[in-house]
């Protein structure tokens, strides 16, 4: 189904013409549950991966025996989705049956891979793949048309509390025989690192730079227009929530800075880096409901409506990936928010 972002509540450039200098286009990816294939752009779907190319692994030292079984995470989601979608029998309560509930309660975190040492290689998890045909403005090497994102689903890398992320760029036309079975780790440190299969419906939208990165005089005029905080309510139109940066998974545009002070990201070569993709925990929340697509309005408050990928970054935050526009071979930078 096509997803359509509602028109913004006001013409912000009409109010503040100088915002034109701080405008950018972004591609909202609109992931929704589905059954993508290797030739589709997707979140949590199978990759177009060459059969003769080794699947990337994590060898960084960290605990990898303990956590949730990947298979249990996927089974839990399937049972719950089916249970809440079906019509209960007369007199029965909605949701999982007693038998399903018993199975679900048996899935517990534990030492499910006791044979693994802390440095044993474990396969990275496939997170998302994007074809340039679906996201024409996608950054990266111009001679490659497919971006694949993988991560190690444990919070213990580079001395920080975050997953290790790897980007792979390739030319889809050069892939011959495709890997038949995609490797996965037996155990994940958090179920929020296991993306549920989603198809995408990319949509181009206009964004404006984060409020804190605007010139001080423009900030002051916007604040004056918004009025006193004590007079604002749920119907008030605010720059940060309604006019600036689109929520959810997206490519390009401006980065949401929800946990740290906004910053300009600079490559080691001295070039200002550009946002490649935002991996988000939610497609919307209470502060960004004006961005809910028209097609989702009627079901926006249903279970999992705003969390179709089931990905959770940090404490319901996001991961912003930046790349160098001058040289695509330069190392990307990752910023975790939340």
Image: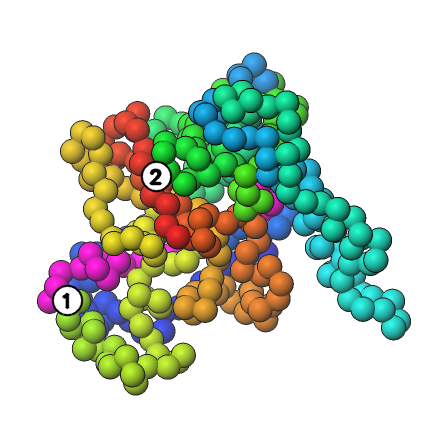
Q: Is residue 201 visible?
A: no
Report, in whole angstroms, how far the alpha carbon at label 2 lies from the one at label 1.
Answer: 29 Å
Q: Is residue 206 magenta?
A: yes
Can you identify the residue that label 1 sits on?
218
Q: Nearer the viewer, residue 232 or 176?
A: 232
Q: Which residues are magenta?
A: 194-217
Q: Nearer the viewer, mark 2 or mark 1?
A: 2
Looking at the image, which residue is at 18% across and 29% down? Answer: 269
Q: How is the image coloured?
A: rainbow
Q: Is residue 242 visible?
A: yes
Q: Position of residue 284 (x, y in %)?
A: 47, 62
Residue at the extreme top of the image, as rendered: 52
Looking at the image, which residue is at 55% across and 56% down? Answer: 307
Q: Position of residue 168 (x, y in %)?
A: 43, 28
Rendered position, 39 above or below 192: above
- Label 1 element class: helix
Q: Position of residue 93 (x, y in %)?
A: 81, 69
Looking at the image, which residue is at 64% across and 27% down? Answer: 114
Of pointers 2 and 1, the one earlier in the residue sequence? 1
Q: Is residue 318 left or right of residue 330?
A: right
Hey, which quadrant is residue 180 in on the image? top right
Rendered position, 98 above or below 217: above
Residue at the extreme bottom of the image, as rendered: 231
Looking at the image, which residue is at 38% across and 58% down? Answer: 246
Q: Which mark is residue 334?
A: 2
- Label 2 element class: strand
Q: Is residue 32 magenta?
A: no
Q: Position of residue 32 (x, y in %)?
A: 58, 52
């Amino acid at each position: 189904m096509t997803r359509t972002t509602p028109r913004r509540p006001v013409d912000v450039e009409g109010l503040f013409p100088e915002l034109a200098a701080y405008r950018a286009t972004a591609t909202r990816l609109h992931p929704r549950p589905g059954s993508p294939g290797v030739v589709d752009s997707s979140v949590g779907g199978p990759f177009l991966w060459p059969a003769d190319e080794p699947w990337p692994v994590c060898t960084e030292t960290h605990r990898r025996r303990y956590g949730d079984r990947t298979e249990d995470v996927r089974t839990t989601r399937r049972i719950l989705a089916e249970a809440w979608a079906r019509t209960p029998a007369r007199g029965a309560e909605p949701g999982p049956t007693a038998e399903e509930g018993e199975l679900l309660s048996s899935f517990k975190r534990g030492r499910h891979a006791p044979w693994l040492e802390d440095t044993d290689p474990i396969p990275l998890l496939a997170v998302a793949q994007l074809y340039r045909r679906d996201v024409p403005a996608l950054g990266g090497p111009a001679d490659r048309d497919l971006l694949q994102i993988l991560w190690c689903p444990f919070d213990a890398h580079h001395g920080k509390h975050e997953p290790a992320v790897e980007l792979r760029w390739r030319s889809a036309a050069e892939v011959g025989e495709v890997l038949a079975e995609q490797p996965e780790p037996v155990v994940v440190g958090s179920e929020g690192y296991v993306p549920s299969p989603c198809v995408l419906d990319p949509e181009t939208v206009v964004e404006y730079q984060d409020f804190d990165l605007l010139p001080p005089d423009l900030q002051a005029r916007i604040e004056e227009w918004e009025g006193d905080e004590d007079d604002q309510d749920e119907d008030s139109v605010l720059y940060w929530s309604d006019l600036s940066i689109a929520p959810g998974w997206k490519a390009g545009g401006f980065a949401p800075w929800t946990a740290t002070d906004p910053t300009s990201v600079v490559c080691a070569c001295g070039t200002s880096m550009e946002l490649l993709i935002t991996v988000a925990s939610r497609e919307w929340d209470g502060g960004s409901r004006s961005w809910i697509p028209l097609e989702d309005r009627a079901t926006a408050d249903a279970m999992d409506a705003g969390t179709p990928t089931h990905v959770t970054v940090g404490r319901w935050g996001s991961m912003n990936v930046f790349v160098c526009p001058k040289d695509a071979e330069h190392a990307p930078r990752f910023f975790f928010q939340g």
